[in-house]
Amino acid sequence: MKRIVALILLLSFLLAACGAPAQATPSVHEDALFTPTAPATETPAPPTATATRTPSPTPPGPTATETLLPTLELPTLAPVEPVLDVWDGQPTYLADSQPGYFFRVRYRPDIWGLTQDSYGQPALGHRTIEYCILAPAGPRGMAPGMQVEHDTRKIGTLFFEVNVVLLQGVRQFVTYQAADKIIFTGFQVNFVDEIDACLADAEAVLATLTSIPESQATPVP
C-alpha cells in the first residue's frame, strides 16, 4: 500500500513539472536584429561649378588716319619757261663740305615748282603728283618701328647713298646723300601716291647735282 502511494506522488510531481510553461530567455542576437537604426543621412554632393565664359578682348579699332599737311603753293608757270631752271642751296653737311660752296640742281619748271615746304625751307613741289616733294635733308634719327633699306646707286655722274624708310613694309620716304669731293649734301623725297613716278622725277633732278662757288649761286631768299 505504501508503495502504491509513493508511486502516485512521484507521478503527480512529474506531471506538475512537465505542465509548467518554460519562460523564454531573450536572445542577444534577436535584440540586435530588431533594434531600429537611424536612417542613413545622405551627404549632399558639392555644387557643380558653372563654367563662366570670359569674353574675348575687343580688337582695337582702326587707327586715326594721319592728317596730311596742305599741298604746297607752287609758282605759276610763266608763258615762256626755260627748259631747265636751277636751284642753288647750302649743302646739308657743312662740316664735311668745303666752305664757300653751294649745291646746284637743275629741274624742269613744267614738272617742278621751286617754293617753300611746310617748315619754311626751300623745296621743289611736283606740279602733277600731290605731296611729291624734294627737299634738302641733313642727319636725322628714325622714329620707333621704322625700317631702313640701304643702297648705293649711281645717279647722273655721282654715287648716291639711297635709304628707303619703311613702316610695316610700306615706303614712307626716301633720302639721298652724295659728295662730289667739294660738298656733301642730302635730299629727302616725300610722297603719298604714285611713289615710283615721284621718285623717278626726283632722281632726274638729282642726276644734275654739282657744286658751285657761293659767288655764282642764286639761293632762294
Image (cartoon, helix red, strand yellow):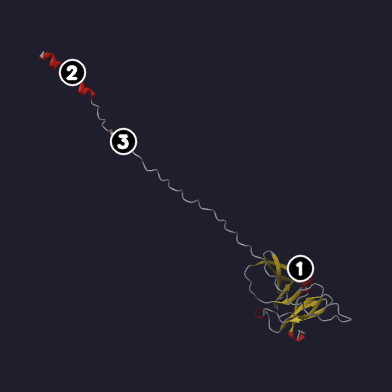
Q: Do the residues labelled 1 and 3 touch (CB within 8 Å)?
A: no
Residue 15, position in %: x, y?
A: 21, 21
Which residue is identified by label 2? 11
Q: Is mark 2 on a helix, strand or loop?
A: helix
Residue at mark 2 to residue at mark 3: CA–CA distance: 39 Å
Q: Which amino acid does label 1 sit on?
A: Ile
Q: In which quarter of the image is residue 218?
A: bottom right
Q: Which amino acid does label 2 sit on?
A: Leu
Residue at mark 1 to residue at mark 3: CA–CA distance: 106 Å
Q: Nearer the viewer, residue 40 or 100?
A: 40
Residue at mark 1 to residue at mark 2: CA–CA distance: 144 Å
Crowd class of label 1 (few under 14; some 14 to 19; many from 20; radius 10 Å): some
Q: Do the residues labelled 2 and 3 touch (CB within 8 Å)?
A: no
**Going from the N terminus, do you reach mark 2 or mark 3 first?**
2
Q: Which of 6 and 120 is in front in this view?
A: 6
* Rendered position, 26 above or below 156: above
Residue 182, position in %: x, y?
A: 70, 78
Residue 103 showing in the rendered view = no
| Residue lying at 67% horizontally and 81% vertically, measured from the top left | 94
Crowd class of label 3 (few under 14; some 14 to 19; many from 20; radius 10 Å): few
Q: In which quarter of the image is residue 179?
A: bottom right
Which residue is identified by label 1? 195
Q: Nearer the viewer, residue 108 or 39?
A: 39
